[in-house]
Amino acid sequence: PPPPPPPPPPPPPLPPSPSPPPPPLPPPPTPSPPTPSLPLLWGSARMSSGHSNNFANQFMAKAADGNSRTFGKSKGKKTSPWFSAKASSTPISAVTVTPDTKNKASKVKKYLKGFEIWVGATAGDKAVKCGGPFAWSVIKRGPVTAQCAAAPTHSYVTVVLPGRKKTLGFGEIELH
C-alpha cells in the first residue's frame, strides 16, 4: 500500500500579542500648603544708629513688598548694622530672608554674608538667636529660613550683619 500522506504542516506561529499598557501613574502628592507669612506692623521698624525711623520704615516697605528686586539697604559702612520689625502676632516660628535679586552676586554677598537672625522683646534686642552667621554658599542659593522655635513670646525680629564697615541689604523678609 502506498505510504500515508505526510501530515499537514503546523500552522504559522501567531504574532506576539501586544503587552497591555502600563497602569497610569498615581498623581503626584499634593504639596503641603506654605506656612503663612505674618504681616509686619507698619511704623514699628527700627534700625541701628545713624538711621532715622523714617529710613527704617522705607527699608521695611521695600523688604516686605513681595518683590526681591526692591530691596532695603542700610546706610553704608556701619558697625554691625541691624534692622528690626515688630510682628503683628506671635509666636514667630521661623524667619525667611531673601537676598535681593536686582544686584550682582558680588554686592549681594557684601550685603548679607555672615548675617544673623534674632528675636527679642524690643527693636534691636538679640534675646534668642534663630540662625546664622549664614555662609555665602547658603545665601546664594536663595531664601534663607531660620527656625525660631525657642522664642514663643518675642515679637521683634532683628537681622544683623556683624562686623565693621558693613552695609546690610536684602530683598524680602517674611515671618512664619
Image (tube, grey):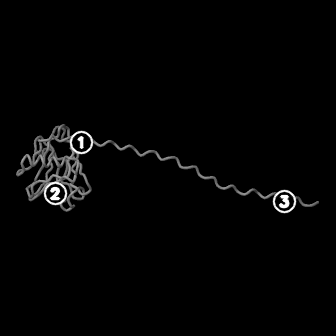
Question: In the depicted view, which residue is nearer to us: 24 or 2?
Answer: 24
Residue at position x 10%, y 44% in the image: 123
* In the image, residue 95 above or below residue 138: above
Residue at position x 15%, y 44% in the image: 157
Question: In the depicted view, which residue is nearer to us: 90 or 105?
Answer: 105
Closer to viewer: mark 3 or mark 2: 2
Q: Position of residue 83 (x, y in %)?
A: 12, 49
**Mark 3 vs 2, N-terminal side:** 3
Per the image, the residue denoted by label 2 is 111
Disc 1 packing (10 Å; few <14; some 14–19; many ≥20): some
Disc 3 packing (10 Å; few <14; some 14–19; many ≥20): few
**Mark 2 vs 1, N-terminal side:** 1
Per the image, the residue denoted by label 1 is 37
At mark 1, the secondary structure is loop
Q: Position of residue 107 (x, y in %)?
A: 18, 60
* Mark 3 residue type: Pro
Q: Is residue 39 left or right of residue 54?
A: right
Disc 2 from disc 1: Cα separation: 24 Å
* In the image, residue 96 above or below residue 166: above
For the N terminus, the quadrant is bottom right
Residue at position x 10%, y 53% in the image: 81
Q: Position of residue 22 (x, y in %)?
A: 53, 49
* In the image, residue 167 above or below residue 38: below
* Mark 1 residue type: Ser
Q: Residue furthest right?
A: 1
For the C terminus, the quadrant is top left
Disc 3 from disc 2: Cα separation: 95 Å
At mark 3, the secondary structure is loop
Disc 2 packing (10 Å; few <14; some 14–19; many ≥20): many
Per the image, the residue denoted by label 3 is 6
